Amino acid sequence: MMRQFKSRQFIFFLVTGGIAAAVNFASRIVFNWWTSFSLAIILAYVAGMATAFILARLFVFKDSRKSLQRSGMLFVLVNLVAVLQTWLISMALAYYVLPAIGVQAFVHEIAHATGLIVPVFTSYIGHKKFSFS
């Protein structure tokens, strides 16, 4: 299992995922101007997910034998798990953990960034085994 996290494909996944995470993070800040933190996380995840799908299909899993529609559907299903992880971690950190330990600056940014990092490994396995197999 550890060998797959040292592969060239995983490195490409991290780079393309990093770009998608940057889109996600930046768009969450913009969405948060008009919506709650909770809803902004979900909306931003959609923007990041669209970016991630395009980049993953073009650069990471380009040898996939699945149709674009099938890959897209499975990509969304895998990302439903990831968005749930991101949302739960972000909300718990922002409203419970960080205030409890006295963090007052950049609470939403720290919480959201941490929430984005957590599903990296589960998403890679899900996309490799299901979305783009």
Image (cartoon, helix red, strand yellow):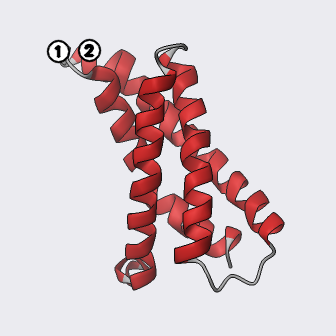
Circles 2 and 1 in contact, beta carbons < 8 Å: yes
Q: In which quarter of the image is residue 13?
A: bottom left
Is residue 49 at all visible to an observer of this figure?
Answer: yes
- Residue picked out by circle 2: 99
* Badge count: 2
Q: Which residue is drawn at 51% across and 23% down?
A: 31
Bin the neighbour count of mark 2 within 10 Å (Cα to Cα): few under 14, some 14-19, many 20 and up: few
Q: Residue at x 43, y 48 (%)?
A: 21
Q: In this view, does 104 lie to the left or right of 83?
A: left
Using the image as rendered, state which of residue 72 and residue 126 is in the foreground: 72
| In this view, 127 is above or below 21 | below
Marking on residue 84: none
SS at badge 2: helix
Identify residue type, mark 2. Pro
Q: Residue at x 47, y 30 (%)?
A: 28
Is residue 119 at all visible to an observer of this figure?
Answer: no
| In this view, 96 is above or below 68 | above
SS at badge 1: loop
Residue 124 spot, x, y in % from top left: 51, 66
- Quarter of the rendering occupied by the C terminus: bottom right
Bin the neighbour count of mark 1 within 10 Å (Cα to Cα): few under 14, some 14-19, many 20 and up: few
Identify residue type, mark 1. Gly
Label 2 vs label 1: CA separation? 5 Å
Q: In this view, does 18 lie to the left or right of 124?
A: left
- Residue picked out by circle 1: 102
Q: Residue at x 48, y 33 (%)?
A: 27
Q: In which quarter of the image is residue 17?
A: bottom left
- Quarter of the rendering occupied by the N terminus: bottom left
